[in-house]
């Protein structure tokens, strides 16, 4: 733990970097651009590449000794004391199809611990910027946010992400039983259900088929808003995480039995 470190300066720089990426994203959004396919068949565009470069430019100028772990530009000094985790356009499929369900994700890792997070969805709902630094709470568009006080399954709003991957797991029958116990099921996905959970508008999330760059920043934001987050099987969030079990904190004990059959090594997608 790094209780004596004040990470707010790093957060301010991360927000500046996210705004630099936003300028690039706004330039290309709903325009004409080529779409290429990566090895895993996921799309990548010039907006992904240029916005990650814009982020790195801001962060490198401020912290030339820091490392990077980026979605498009790869690793650089990834064993440094401070490492930035960057997904410039998380939700490229949405970006390509011209609807605003995508975000920029920037997180800072200090000696292996996630300490700063910025999640910026510039084209969604007039713009949603959620951010947090360890020990200083979380905000959404500049206003403090907290998780809900819901503590009963019968009152819980649960969001499921990447349902096809969850449905292919041997744990699915238990998750199905949970679906029958909660108040409301939704599938918001991507950045949005984490923004909703951190700001008290839903109560829990189960999600698979993701990677650390999708959730690193959101992990910091959710924790600073009073929530909790782990892998589906209960393991800690780390560079190899492929699934999420997140709640407002009060519901973890009630939901945990329904996801106990999830085996990260067996059930998480490998592609």
Image: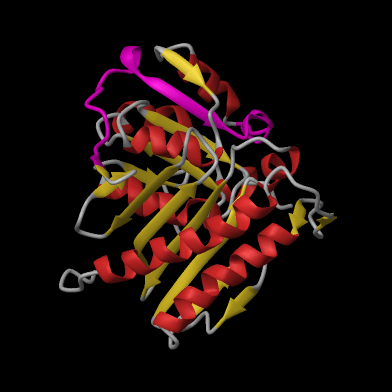
Q: Find out whether residue 153 is within the magenta segment.
A: yes
Vertical placement of 264 versus 49: above or below? Answer: above
Work out which quarter of the rendered image holds the N terminus and state it: bottom left
145 or 220: which is nearer to us? Answer: 145
Q: Residue at x 42, y 49 (%)?
A: 218
| Left or right: where 47 falls relative to 157 | right
Residue 171 found in image quarter = top right
247 or 258: which is nearer to us? Answer: 247
Please provide percent x and percent y for residue 81. 39, 82
Q: Residue at x 69, y 52 (%)?
A: 28
- Give the residues drawn in magenta, as a range: 144-170
| Left or right: where 178 falls relative to 13 | right
Q: Find out whether residue 270 is within the magenta segment.
A: no
Please provide percent x and percent y for residue 19. 47, 59
Please provide percent x and percent y for residue 138. 27, 48
Q: Residue at x 32, y 43 (%)?
A: 228
Seen from this angle, which residue lies furthest bottom?
A: 65
């Amino acid at each position: 733990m790094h209780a004596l470190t004040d990470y707010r300066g790093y957060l301010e720089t991360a927000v500046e970097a996210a705004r630099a990426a936003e300028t690039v994203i706004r330039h290309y959004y709903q325009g004409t651009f080529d779409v290429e396919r990566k090895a895993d068949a996921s799309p990548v565009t010039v907006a992904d590449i240029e916005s990650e470069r814009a982020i790195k430019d801001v962060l490198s100028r401020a912290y030339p000794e820091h490392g990077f772990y980026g979605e498009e530009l790869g690793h650089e000094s990834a064993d440094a004391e401070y490492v930035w985790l960057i997904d410039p356009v998380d939700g490229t499929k949405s970006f390509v199809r011209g609807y605003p369900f995508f975000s920029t994700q920037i997180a800072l890792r200090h000696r292996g611990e996630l300490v700063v997070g910025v999640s910026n969805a510039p084209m969604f709902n007039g713009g949603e910027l959620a951010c947090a630094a360890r020990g200083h709470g979380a905000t959404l568009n500049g206003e403090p946010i907290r998780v809900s006080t819901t503590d009963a399954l019968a009152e819980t709003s649960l969001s499921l992400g990447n349902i096809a991957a969850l449905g292919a797991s041997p744990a699915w029958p238990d998750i199905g039983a949970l679906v029958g116990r909660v108040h409301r099921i939704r599938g918001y996905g991507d950045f949005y259900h984490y923004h909703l959970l951190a700001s008290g508008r839903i109560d829990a999330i189960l999600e698979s088929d993701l990677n650390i760059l999708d959730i690193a920043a959101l992990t910091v934001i959710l924790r600073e808003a009073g929530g909790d987050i782990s892998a589906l099987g209960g393991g800690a969030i780390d560079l190899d995480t492929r699934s999420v079990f997140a709640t407002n904190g009060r519901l973890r004990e009630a939901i945990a039995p329904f996801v106990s059959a999830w085996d990260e090594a067996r059930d998480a997608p490998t592609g």
